[in-house]
Image (spheres, rainbow, N blue to C red):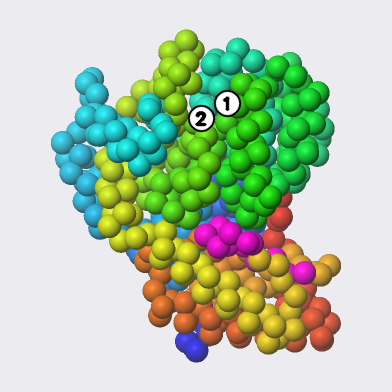
Amino acid sequence: MKKRSNLKKDDLLSGKGQRLWKRAKKIIPGGNQLLSKRAEMFLPDLWPAYYSKAKAVYIWDLDGRKYLDMSLMAVGACALGYADFDVNKAVANVVRRGSISTLNAPEEVELAELLCSIHPWAHMVRYARAGGESMAIAARIARAYTGRDIIAFCGYHGWADWYLATNLKDPKGLNDHLLSGLEPKGVPQGLRGTILPFHYNQIDELEKIVKENDGKIAAIIMEPVHSDEPKDNFLQKVRAIADKTGAVLVFDEITIGWKLTFGGAHLHYKVNPDMAIFGKALSNGYPMAAIIGKREVMQAAQGSFISSSYWTDRIGPAAALATIKKMKHVGLSQHLIKTSLKIKEIWKKTAAKHGIAIETAEVPVILTIAFKGEDGNEAKTLFTQEMLQCGILAGGIFYASYAHTDAHIARYARAVDEVFGIIAKARKTGGVKKLLKGPVAHTGFQRLN
């Protein structure tokens, strides 16, 4: 086992990362641009918060401390690892030649042709630069194509009005879709009732929505898979409902895409949507998103206004082309599955060894762990705190990358064994909260300023 760090609470409290985070919360609403990266989601008052450098699976904070990232890997965006040489080379090449101009980037045509060849059911492509906006584009196109307003959905799909309108009708409507506590403030009241949730694998809930809104469903929007595997031909049944009702079936592949199989996860399950959306791993850390779909559906974009200057930059398409080519060359999805299953086995065996009850996701490439019990979130916070002492960034989610090696996994396994032992002992001797050096981590949407 690598020697534990002598990092003290005061080191982190007074570190450059926490000092900058406190400044940020005064001038940036929420402190940053992404809830998943807020320090309070990991280790309030003690998380390093900012980085100076990232390479492969290592991150250096502002004080020069080096960490092994066994957590988010840029929220699943860097599936090849940080600062991948081949992707960076492709980006540097187009930056030198000009990243944007009055004319269009030829790479966007090459990328569109490549995406359609990987997904033969798709005939046309539009681009954006982020997941949330690409989902808003997909919802707009689906409504434009069908001439209808109502969307049935399952899962998490971003920040836009069309999605948050769920909570206008039911304040807890989004609680079971990854993120609880969201308020639809600023969302037009006129959107009430236009977005209706159903749970994954609960086909009866979707059937009820369709029955109660006969002929009014514009789209069925969902991830083909997230934490749980589809059961009882769930995806096939959703596809059949979309066909019967004339609704556009949209698969949000922003998180799962390219990880479970080369291309979209829907290829693995052999169920084709009418539109699919890719982001995150598509371009390995560079802003890029793609909306692909059937010709007749995608052409509806021409009847609406969907346009933005920076959707035409050259960096995103160049990064995506290099990323896709490398993902195929190295067999990325196989490596991610193999690595994720090893981590899951470490969690299960080590938890059993120390008598700790845990829950893990069925789908390995979006791997989550939860500590059972009333002190579950306190235990997760202590896990993050003690792993940080081992020089490892860790929490309730693990995204594998191609840069994770067996040596990294072995180091992680030794640390998990030690930290699970600390948690188990704490539970027997007064509770895990007594060992926390700061507040308990947030679990949902909580305002910071």
**Percent x, y of residue 76:** 48, 54
Under circle 1, the secondary element is strand
Q: Report the residue that reaches farthest toward the left.
A: 97
Q: Which residues are magenta?
A: 361-372
- Give the quadrant of residue 205: top right
114 drawn magenta: no
Numbered label tally: 2
Camera-side residue of 89 and 292: 292
Camera-side residue of 299 and 383: 299
371 drawn magenta: yes
Viewed as shown, does residue 319 lie left or right of 289? left
Q: Amino acid at mark 1?
A: Val
Q: Marks 1 and 2, how far apart in space? A: 6 Å
Asked if residue 241 can be seen in this view, the reply is yes
Evaluate if marks 1 and 2 touch, with contact meaning CB atoms under 8 Å apart: yes
Camera-side residue of 368 and 261: 261
Q: Amino acid at mark 2?
A: Asp
Residue that badge 1 annotates: 248
* x 66%, y 45%: residue: 234
Under circle 2, the secondary element is loop
Name which of mark 1 and mark 2 comes first in the sequence: 1
Residue that badge 2 annotates: 274
Q: Assess disc 1: are there few (<14), some (14-19) or many (≥20) residues with their C-alpha within 10 Å of its C-alpha.
A: many
* x 41%, y 46%: residue: 263
* x 72%, y 71%: residue: 358
**Percent x, y of residue 36:** 59, 51
* x 55%, y 15%: residue: 144
